[in-house]
Amino acid sequence: MTNTFIRIIDNQRTGAIDFLDTEDAFKNKTVAAGQIADLRAVVPWATSENEFQARHMEVRDSATETTLFYIWQRTAESSNLVRVSTVGFEDPGNGIAGNATAGGKDRVLRVSGNISLDDLA
């Protein structure tokens, strides 16, 4: 399994977001509207709904505490991708917008009305 590292999170929303990592609570943080924050987190691997419960990331709206996006890695249908969902674990799950290919160290997680994972320039 190839790890994917998210170096920073870019909150392009008009309100604050909470980033939660179920594998590493030390990575949890709130990012104010329009701000960029250092993250340095590894996207967790989950191959089943049972694993997903303890191995995923969430992006939440800080004001409402509503989960906007769930993020995890999974190899399915010969594709090793970072997956994203708005409802929780999905089988196999859609690849996140931007660069969904698993692996790589310097990625930025951009959160607006949508979410994407891009290589840092």
Image (cartoon, helix red, strand yellow):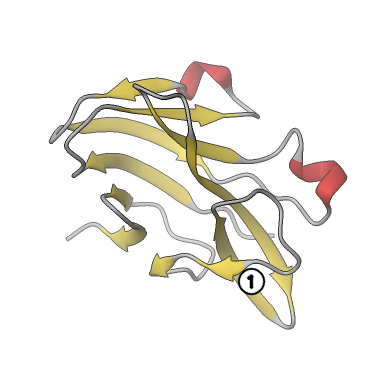
- Determine the image quadrant of residue 50: top right
Q: Is residue 29 left or right of residue 83?
A: left
Report the front residue among 18 and 22: 18
Quadrant containing the N terminus is bottom right
Report the front residue among 89 and 65: 65
Q: Is residue 105 left or right of residue 58?
A: left
Seen from this angle, which residue lies furthest bottom? 78
Image location of residue 118, percent across then percent down: 31, 62
The answer to whether residue 92 is above or below residue 49 is: below
Seen from this angle, which residue lies furthest top? 26
Name which residue lies at 48% across and 32% down.
66
Question: Residue beneath label 1, please?
Answer: 80
Other-residue count near label 1 (Cα within 10 Å), few / some / many at <14 / 14–19 / ≥20: some
- Determine the image quadrant of residue 56: top right
The answer to whether residue 45 is above or below residue 21 is: below
Image location of residue 15, percent across then percent down: 22, 30
